[in-house]
Amino acid sequence: MNGKIEAVIGPMYSGKTEELIRRVVRRNIARQHGMIFKISSDKRTKGENVTSRAGTSLIATTVDSAKDTLKFLGENMDYVAFDEAQFFCEDLFEVVNLFVKHGTDVIVAGLNLDFRSEPFDNVMKIVAIADEIVLLKAVCVVCGEDATRTQRLILKEGQWLPASLNDPIFKVEGEDVQIRYEPRCKDCWRGG
Ligand code: ADP
Ligand code: MG
Ligand code: ZN
């Protein structure tokens, strides 16, 4: 039987990792076996685990690419989970399909939109073939409404300003300039 796909999407701070962990914990209680994957290029989270901002944490396996996970395909796991799906390349789609064909359920947690509010194509391709889609919302830090977007701010001359829409999509904090992200609703989100 084919595996099922659960897609958990939303902006930063919306509880994607928390939800991924909750789903994996339930499966483990049901005596299912599986693995959580995270990508090595994501330097923000250290150590061999995924941790939510709410403090929950589970052991994870760090891989260099989506294809890297295929070496575990033959283990006939009940489920696999990918956190921060947007950091995996386009081949995540193919890899998810291979697990599904193998009978393994796949949980994918990732950002819906980049900081320019453009869809992440590799995440949205998985949404298109998902059996269940969960759109999580954060709390807009400006007005308190539901937030579906992620605002990138850059520190310029002592002021936090919306990042230029021409900046690279992946820019991790602390690289060259000071960057901050916050969840915002459509009305409070600003493109610089
Ligand atoms: P994600 O993986 O989507 O970035 P996490 O699962 O790591 O989110 O963290 C979600 C948690 O972040 C919430 O349960 C809450 O405790 C905390 N949090 C902090 N700021 C906010 C906010 N503005 N909106 C929602 N949750 C927030
Ligand atoms: Mg997360
Ligand atoms: Zn708002």
Image (cartoon, helix red, strand yellow):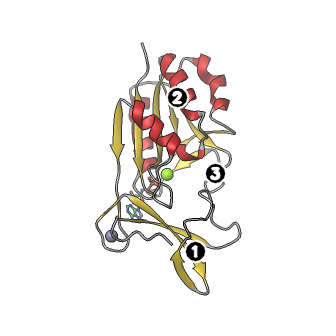
x, y percent for residue 59: 57, 40
Whether residues under marks 2 and 1 lie with C-beta atoms below 8 angstroms apart, the answer is: no
CA distance for labels 2 and 1: 35 Å
Quick one: which residue is furthest to the front in this view?
A: 166
Question: Whereabouts is ligand 1, in terms of quadrant?
Answer: bottom left
- Picture quarter containing residue 163? bottom right
Identity of the residue furthest to the bottom in this view:
157
Residue 34, x across and y down, in percent = 52, 28
- Circle 2 crowding by C-alpha within 10 Å: few under 14, some 14–19, many from 20: many
Residue ID at (61%, 87%): 157
- Pick whichever, 47 or 163, lies toward us: 163
Question: Is residue 159 shown to the viewer in this render?
Answer: yes
Q: CA distance from mark 3 to mark 1?
A: 20 Å
Q: Which mark is residue 42?
A: 3
What residue type is disc 3 on?
Answer: Asp
Which disc number belongs to residue 154?
Answer: 1
Single out the mark in the foreground, 2 or 3.
2
Of mark 2 and mark 1, the one earlier in the sequence is 2
Give percent across and percent down for residue 46: 64, 53
